[in-house]
Image: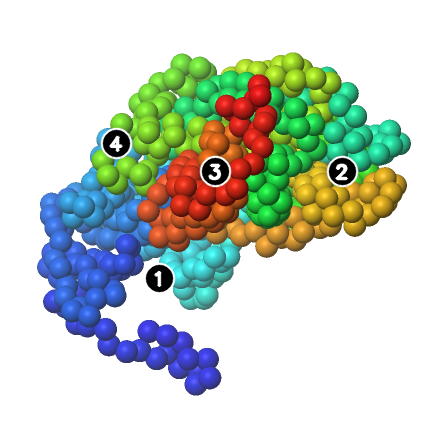
Amino acid sequence: MQWNESSKKLVSSQFTNLPRPLKQISAQIYENNLYVAGFDQQWYFFKIAVDSEQRKWTQLSSDIFTSTSTRQLKLAIQNDGKNDRLYAISENYSSKSYDANSALLMHMFNPDANTWMPIVNRTASQLVETNSLIYASALGQSHLLIITKNGHAKSFNTITKAWSNYGSSNYTFHNIVANRAHTYALATDTITAKTTLVKGNINNTAREFGWQNMLVLVVYLLSVVMVGLYFMFKNKNTDDYFRGGQSIPWWAAACSIYATMLSSLTYIALPAIVYQTNWVLLIGIWMIIAVAPIAVYVAIPFFRQLDATSAYEFLSKRFNMSVRLFASGLFTLFHIGRMGIVMALTALALSAVTPISATESVLIMGVLCLLYCTLGGVEAVIWTDTIQTVVLLIGAVVCFFVIIAGLDDGFTSFIQIGFADDKFTIVNTDFSFESITTLSIWVIILGGIGQNLSSYTADQAVVQRYMVTKDPAAAAKSIWANAILAAPGALLFFCIGTGLYAFYQLNPEKLDPSIQIDQIFPTFISNELPIGVAGLIIAGIFAAAQSTVSTSMNSIATTVLTDFVRPFNFVKSEKAYMSLARILTFVSGVLGTLVGLIFIDPEIRSLMEAYFKVIGMFMGALGGIFILGALTKKANSIGAIVGIISGVSLMISAWKYGWANGYLYGTIGILTCLIVGYFVSLLFPAHNKDLTRLTLFTMKD
């Protein structure tokens, strides 16, 4: 059925007849099938493929509803933290009196077995009394809203499996419809006996942010800008602007690398992912420990001996200028997209807990980054990164202790709930052919190695940190320190994610059912932490996003100036180069901010999953081309170009058709570029080229 706006009529066309007449019908479309439940002396359950020309109904088992004396039944679709699921909310009664209270039962459909699995067992603690179920539908990204005829409203969290009760109204409801923003009900006022149309809203339950928190936020962000102003007067040339005069202490470089890789993505989105799933991603993040020796003993010597400002200078020496420009351009596109994702994630998350809208947040972050990064260069970026690393990690520790304090039995509840609900699962041992689309252990290990390998060999934002210290030994210390910091840091954020799960399972009414999953940690910070402390940590999240964005801005300006401008002598003086550097930084920031505004989409379930795909799609192929050049002597420019195009093309096909998990994109990109690039180089051998100090085998030539 469809509403025709021009004729102001409801237009219908017959799809196909039901196998039998039914009443009390409820229907949902799930996995390209239309599922229908209805009553005719007993409950029936049918499905039909919506895109099939045969249009044949299949009857499915409904014994579970018939055997439990079901009075009402509603179908609804919601995500359980892993996938969308089809739920049946049914009203079960044992008394012959229709007015007697009854219990709500929850079942989840298993499409592989075509059977229903109980979600809420009929135990004393899980009974939810009701009078007459009239409405059940998805609410937000993880709740089912249930409303009864006498006005009782409840919600069921499909992740924590906890019920929340929202009281009742003075209405008797007859019918309810809903859209994203409002719920409308045809209801009778129990006092006046008049029937009317009632509109209901979902009110945000977040505590008011308060002027104290806002003051801390403003002071912190302005302080970051002051750092940029301070270093503006220290930059005398482009070497100061892009490499800090190679005078940065190793520990500050380590904090900068950590902050760059941490960002608000990790701080906000990682606890959110763990809250709805488990710990399977932990091993992948810890793969930095496996990649650190490669960065220390291979990547750093390569880039330091070249005395490079841009990571892609190596490619012009190893292959040719075309390969360098292609890779540098790909890096630029990736970091513009990365800036957008980071700003959008932070803005969407913080809009739930501050009076600042998502659009305003993106604009504020963009403008502040434009100010201090454009003015202060890489030195301003590194020192603000260092400050923000300290603030964010201390804030995360405070949050974890507050979470534990909010549990009934403290740390004991954390452990018991985590093990009872499999939240500490760290290994998925699925090795089937289909496991390439899941987070199985081999996908996690290979994906983690690929992502870290790409970042620490081909990402200008990280490679630039190799060049800001006084010597290779100091650069190596920064990598080791970053790896040591990353391992317990990741563990802390996983504990926070599981802690949030336990906290909101025991305190379900404290969770606003309408928020996005990515907003759950900022919401906890705003509602549960003391005023002032909450403002400081929220400011730190803002600043973490700015840290990542400013790093990308500086790195983009570095590559564009060093790879696209300086080799062709478009600018004649160092003063002109400095001016152009600031202009390029400004332009990259504007582009990133615009992309951030585009990415503000409340329907995105997890921006971190989107980030995994983006980083793999671009950085995997870039990492592959560096490894191709460093590990082989026969690779040439033709093979490099074909390899990198093949890697990116394969990742685009994986994204479009979903044949591989996004976490694996980076590794697939590396292997594709390496294998295709090498064999194409053999097919089209190039003229001999001096490879002294340009491969692992000629480093000492």
Marks 4/3: CA distance? 36 Å
Q: Nearer the viewer, mark 3 or mark 2?
A: 3
In the image, what residue type sits under mark 3?
Ala
Looking at the rendered structure, the secondary structure element under dot 3 is loop
In the image, what residue type sits under mark 4?
Asp
Upstream in sequence: badge 4 or badge 2: 2
The one of 386 and 272 positioned closer to us in this rendering: 386
Query: Is there a contact, CB below 8 Å, between mark 3 and mark 1?
Result: no
Give me the residue at 85% from left, 39% from top.
Answer: 574
Upstream in sequence: badge 2 or badge 1: 1
The one of 159 and 279 positioned closer to us in this rendering: 279
Looking at the rendered structure, the secondary structure element under dot 2 is helix
* Circle 3 residue: 635
Marks 2/1: CA distance? 59 Å
Give the position of the C terminus as an image quadrant.
top right
- Kindly identify which numbered label has been placed on residue 430: 4
Indicate the position of residue 538 as horizontal and vertical percent values: 65, 33
Question: Can residue 544 be seen from the camera position used here?
Answer: no
Query: Is there a contact, CB below 8 Å, between mark 4 and mark 3?
Result: no
Upstream in sequence: badge 4 or badge 3: 4
Q: Nearer the viewer, mark 3 or mark 1?
A: 3
Upstream in sequence: badge 3 or badge 1: 1
Give me the residue at 24% from left, 53% from top.
Answer: 73
- Kindly identify which numbered label has been placed on residue 174: 1
